[in-house]
Image (tube, rainbow, N blue to C red):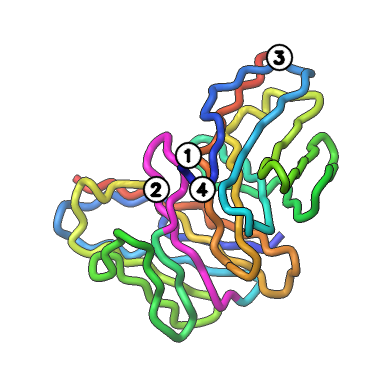
Amino acid sequence: QKEVEQNSGPLSVPEGAIASLNCTYSDRGSQSFFWYRQYSGKSPELIMFIYSNGDKEDGRFTAQLNKASQYVSLLIRDSQPSDSATYLCAVSLFGNEKLTFGTGTRLTIIP
Amino acid sequence: GAVVSQHPSWVICKSGTSVKIECRSLDFQATTMFWYRQFPKQSLMLMATSNEGSKATYEQGVEKDKFLINHASLTLSTLTVTSAHPEDSSFYICSARDGGRATGELFFGEGSRLTVL
């Protein structure tokens, strides 16, 4: 079983709709959760991080964490073509500096 | 956000030669930096953790004699791919954590695309 799993996609969403990206992790000791966006040929850039159960909103982005279900998601509201990218979920254990990445979900926003 | 700069952004070399990639934290000090490798359409795989002033910690399956890491200062880590071969062609990305932040996120360099002919 992979430590961090994501649906590889591609996920196609019409412009203006909500894009929902999902991630599950295997280690119950995981404490910190991150979403990165990576455009083709570029390095990842941080979108959001979340530590506590529940929702965290930042502009059009909402991260949701459910530690009991070992599940973290990212919602993108009012999707724009510029949101088309690969979204990487990353997880770290408490006190551990290393991040473990999922394989990423490729998102395409259709104009 | 914190800035991590990586150089060169792309390099083409002949098989058997060595290539050095530099990673710098520009506006913060990084006692620890991380080197990742990413093959096409795959995720980031951690190669090693670079520790300032001490030996790097390599992930299982990564040859330490092939991928030499030096972290001589709080703002610079280098990765040298020795005797490069075509299978080493990949996107190499460094990252660092700003110890002045409590949030723990990694900031990534721009990446270095290596092509070995």
Q: Name the residue under label 2.
A: B91
Asked if labels 4 and 2 share a chain, the reply is: no
Residue found 59% across the figure and 49% down from its top? A90
Q: Mark 3 points at which residue?
A: A14
Amino acid on which disc 4 is placed: Glu
Q: Give the extent of the magenta segment.
A: B30-46
| Distance from Cα at disc 4 to Cα at disc 2 | 22 Å
| Closest to the observer, A68 or B92 | A68
Amino acid on which disc 1 is placed: Gly
Direction front: furthest residue? A68
Direction bottom: furthest residue? B53
Residue found 44% across the figure and 57% down from its top? B46
Asked if labels 3 and 4 share a chain, the reply is: yes
Whether residue A64 is situated above or below residue B112 in the rendered picture: above
- Give left or right: position of B78 versus A76: left
In the rendering, which numbered label is found on residue A3? 4
In the rendering, which numbered label is found on residue A41? 1
Q: Which of marks 4 and 2 is in front?
A: 4
| Distance from Cα at disc 4 to Cα at disc 1 | 25 Å
Q: Nearer the viewer, mark 4 or mark 1?
A: 4
